[in-house]
Amino acid sequence: MNAPAPEYLLELRFPAQANRMVLVRDIVRSAARFCGFDEPATQDIVLAVGEACQNVILHAYEGRGDGPILLDIMDSADRMILRVTDFGPAVAPTVVQPRALHDLRPGGLGTHFIHKLMDTADFTRSPTGVGNVLQMTKKKEPAK
Amino acid sequence: MTEAIREVNGNLVVTLTGEIDLDRAPAVRRQLLDCVKRQQDVLVDLSAVTYIDSSGIASLVEALQWAKRRGSDLRLVAVSPQALRVFELARLDKVFSIHPTIDAALAAAG
């Protein structure tokens, strides 16, 4: 059986600046609730997106705050898909790999969180050759 | 945003509130380190924290490490469910001393 086709929910474009993240998290929180997630799962999704954007701010744009982040959110019957795209130079895989937990630099801990919080998280280069893409999915609990 | 600090039985109680993210973590870090440098035990009340991420966690870990080096302690009090989830994800719920109330945290100090 094929998975249901996802439906586009929203596309958001914002500057890679830490002080914009409170606004972005509010939108992601609303979107997760709209997709039918309960409060704990909504918090997981919000944290995962927050960590993904933090990685972009710190690593892809190295804190300059002059680049855009694109956030695409799709919804389907069985999952929510969130794609975070930046237009910075390639981020070395070692930067976005989860580090040992005792090594508390933000990047590695954030990526550890993303993998724990979401059902899938795939880091790739943008198909255009410029930028990085992180696609995450969160499965919906089957209706009881 | 300034965090509330008060003194209880010779301990500094820092009450953090709201969302502690990459934007706010540097100010929280400075404030916690300032408290730790006073060489009193520091209790951090997290009951009103609605969001904390890896940058906020890193600030608390750094303050804990400073406190230990200076022979004092940093304990967490009334950790909100969202914050506790993040500590558990980072497996730091066993690294920090976590207490349900200020009184329990004071008692734990002996």
Image (cartoon, coloured by chain):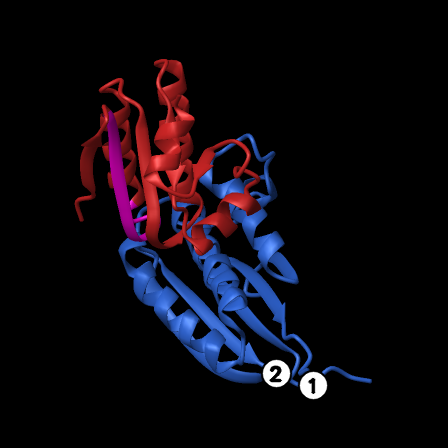
Chain colours: A blue, B red
Question: What's the amino acid at mark 2?
Answer: Ser
Q: Position of residue A139 (x, y in %)?
A: 64, 71
Examine the residues drawn in magenta and state their main secondary structure.
strand
In the image, is residue A113 above or below residue A126? Answer: above
Verify CB contact (< 8 Å) between mark 2 and mark 1: yes
Which structural element holds mark 2?
loop
Residue found 47% across the figure and 33% down from its top: B96
Quadrant of the rendered image containing residue A133: bottom right
Task: Please determine if labels 2 and 1 lie on a single subunit.
Answer: yes
* A38 to the left or right of B61: right
Disc with the residue nearer the chain's start (2 vs 1): 1
Count residues near mark 2 (Cα–Cα under 10 Å), then give few for <14, some for 14-19, many for 20+: some
Q: Which of B68 and A4 is in front in this view?
A: B68
Give the x, y percent position of residue B34: 22, 27
Compared with residue A28, is residue B76 higher up or lower down, i.e. above or below?
A: above
Task: Give the residues drawn in magenta, as a range.
Answer: B11-24
Residue indicated by mark 1 = A4
Find the residue positioned furthest to the right.
Answer: A1
Residue B6, horizontal then vertical, whole percent: 18, 35
Residue B92 vs A123, above or below: the answer is above
Point 37% across, 23% down: residue: B73
Spatial CA distance of label 2 from label 1 is 6 Å
Q: Tag 1: residue type?
A: Pro
Is A104 drawn above or below residue A21 in the view shown?
above
The residue singled out by tag 2 in the image is A76
Of A88 and B69, the residue lying toward us? B69
Which chain is home to disc 2? A
Does the magenta-highlighted stretch encompass residue B22? yes
Q: Mark 1 lies on which chain?
A: A
Can I make out residue A11 in this image? yes
Circle 1 packing at 10 Å, graded few (<14), some (14-19), many (20+), is few
